[in-house]
Image (tube, rainbow, N blue to C red):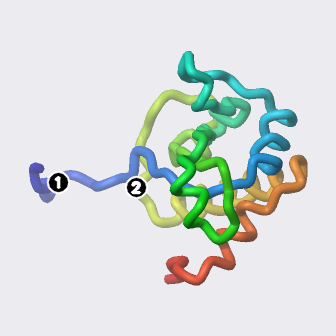
């Protein structure tokens, strides 16, 4: 991997968060926002309602072993893929977020989207993630 040159400003193009949900919680999101099948065998789905706002939500069924060793026995793995530039610039093509203030604004708006999804679907993935014991708190 090449080092960043002194005249380049680093930026985050995309990042993702992973959570787990019970089948019932995942189904609430699917029914509220509609899902699209990604694979022919129907084991991976996505919600694109928030894509123009920089958030894509992918669902995949967990294996029996993953479910067995999880204390909540959650059946669905969810990947929340975030494109920070699109969070601030709805529907715009790709760009760069390089300022700390812009990134803070991205996180504020992303939090609002997560809270909206929780309210509309009666799921609590964001609250669970905030209360996780291994979370990063700067």
Q: Position of residue 96 (x, y in %)?
A: 41, 44
- List the residue tagged with mark 1: 7
Picture mark count:
2
Query: Could you say which is closer to the camera, residue 99 or residue 110?
Result: 110
Disc 1 element:
loop
Q: Position of residue 7 (x, y in %)?
A: 17, 54
Q: Position of residue 131 (x, y in %)?
A: 68, 78
Q: Residue at x 78, y 35 (%)?
A: 30
Horizontal placement of 15 versus 1: left or right? right
* Distance from the alpha carbon under mark 1 to that under mark 2: 13 Å
> For the residue carrying disc 1, how many other residues have a C-alpha within 10 Å: few (<14), some (14-19), or many (20+)?
few
Query: Could you say which is closer to the camera, residue 16 or residue 74?
Result: 74
Q: Residue at x 67, y 74 (%)?
A: 130
Q: Position of residue 32 (x, y in %)?
A: 86, 36
As drawn, the residue found furthest toward the top would be 40
Q: Which mark is residue 98?
A: 2
Query: Could you say which is closer to the camera, residue 130 or residue 9?
Result: 130
Q: Residue at x 59, y 61 (%)?
A: 68
> For the residue carrying disc 2, how many other residues have a C-alpha within 10 Å: few (<14), some (14-19), or many (20+)?
few
Among the two numbered marks 1 and 2 on one chain, the one whose residue lies closer to the N terminus: 1
Q: Residue at x 63, y 32 (%)?
A: 46
Query: Could you say which is closer to the camera, residue 42 or residue 84?
Result: 42
Disc 2 element:
loop
């Amino acid at each position: 991997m090449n080092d960043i040159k002194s005249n380049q400003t680093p930026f985050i193009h995309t990042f993702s968060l992973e959570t787990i949900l019970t089948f019932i919680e995942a189904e609430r999101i699917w029914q509220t926002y509609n899902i699209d099948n990604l694979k022919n065998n129907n084991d991976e789905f996505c919600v694109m309602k928030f894509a123009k706002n920089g958030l894509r939500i992918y669902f995949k069924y967990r294996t029996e072993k993953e479910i067995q060793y999880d204390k909540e026995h959650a059946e669905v793995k969810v990947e929340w893929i975030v494109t920070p530039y699109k969070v601030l610039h709805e529907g715009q093509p790709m760009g760069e977020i390089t300022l700390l203030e812009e990134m803070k604004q991205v996180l504020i708006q992303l939090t609002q989207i997560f809270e909206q999804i929780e309210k509309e679907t009666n799921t609590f993935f964001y609250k669970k993630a905030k209360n996780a014991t291994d979370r990063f708190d700067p």
